[in-house]
Image: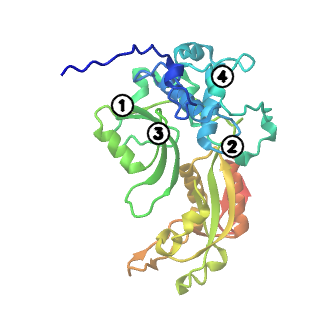
Amino acid sequence: MICLRSSKKTPKRDLDDIFPEDDDLGLLDVAPLKAKAPAGNLIASQFEEITTFFEKNGRIPASDADSFDEKRLARRLKAFKSNGEKRESLKEFDSYGLLADESSYIPSIESVGSSTYEVQESTPSSEIDKSELVTSLDDIFDDDDDLLEFDAPDIFTIRHELKIQVGDFFILNGLMGYVHSAGERLEGYSSYNARLHLVFENGTELHMLFQSLTHGLVRDDHGCKVNREGVLLEPDSNPVPTGLVYVLATKSSDSVLATYKANLYKIGFTEGSVEDRIKHAEKDRTFLEAPVRVVMTTECYNIDAHKLETLVHGFLGYQRLNITLKGHDGQGYKPREWFNVPLATVVEVIKHILDGTISQYRMDNTSGKVMKK
């Protein structure tokens, strides 16, 4: 049997016919074409982070944001916009016109959505609370084009006797890094060791032990230290909070300490909170394996922990507690960071270190007082 069917030619349909309902899934939302930052182009990669933020939040990063990362991106965008050469080199990557002048920047309809754009007045630097200032890590790598170009005499192959210190640049596994700050000297090591805060050119931040970094640079065939002598990385006109100086008193019930407790203090430095630093005091010989009392804390600016530690220990060396204590494990140890000195003297020493005048004073070991030279 032959079955005959009539066929009707289906008319061509446009997109409105295919999607007659509201496009709830956003299938028709097409983002503008963007040039991808090529591998190895640090400036383009850094700008790509700003673009990603804009796409995610529907606005440019704000300099007064609570988030450190957003502040960092805002400062970076400002630096790009104020540098004509960088702005020109980033044109092909600027799909949203983020580098345009404030007066000429007009967001596209697609990028506005339901977001609200607010014009915010800038805060004069004199009105900014120091506690709100954050270290701009981008300034280290963004504001000086010469940081990525060095002459041969400025690069040193790392040997164990060539030490890395706060403020140094280095190259490890092909990435340039910067030693931003160092924590307190760690006990239990035969040579100097401390936890370092490292910042790399790709935006990565790490906390690494000093000895781990130096050993890694020695093992890396191309690892090297870069001499940036004379470059002002953190200008005093923009003070950078680097941590807290704290003074502690012990609550130890050890009878050996009884005769010293009236004037026994530890002076230390931490990048984080003092509470976190001392929360395991009962298990740490640094704190005499006993609870401690926080006597005072003060925020410090533009000073690194190792320098502070060296100055304190050098100035109060004669007043350092010179006794042997027995630890919880039954082994004897000598406290290194506790001083038998009046609190008024401790406060004065810290003051002169932080204001940079400590070289004008000396310690009178007879009276235990700070004297003008």
Residue 231 falls in which quadrant of the image?
A: top right
Mark 1 against mark 3, which lies toward the viewer? 3
Q: Amino acid at mark 3?
A: Thr
Q: Earlier in the sequence, mark 1 or mark 3?
A: 1
Q: Earlier in the sequence, mark 4 or mark 1?
A: 4
Q: Quadrant of the N terminus?
A: top left
Mark 3 crowd level (few <14, some 14–19, many ≥20, 10 Å Cα) = few
Query: According to the image, label 2 marks what residue?
Result: 133
Secondary structure at numbered mark 4: helix
Mark 1 crowd level (few <14, some 14–19, many ≥20, 10 Å Cα) = few
Secondary structure at numbered mark 1: loop
Query: According to the image, label 3 marks what residue?
Result: 204
What is the C-alpha distance between the residues marked 4 and 2?
35 Å
Query: According to the image, label 4 marks what residue?
Result: 109
Q: Earlier in the sequence, mark 3 or mark 4?
A: 4
Q: In this orientation, which residue lies closer to the viewer: 269 or 362?
A: 269
Q: Amino acid at mark 2?
A: Leu
Q: Earlier in the sequence, mark 3 or mark 2?
A: 2
Are the two marked residues, 1 and 2, in contact with CB atoms closer than 8 angstroms? no
Q: Earlier in the sequence, mark 4 or mark 2?
A: 4
Instruction: Residue 111: give x, y in percent of width and height.
Output: 62, 26
Secondary structure at numbered mark 3: loop
Q: Earlier in the sequence, mark 1 or mark 2?
A: 2
Residue 68 located left or right of residue 45 = right
Secondary structure at numbered mark 2: loop
What is the C-alpha distance between the residues marked 1 and 3?
14 Å
What is the C-alpha distance between the residues marked 3 and 4?
34 Å
Query: According to the image, label 1 marks what residue?
Result: 174
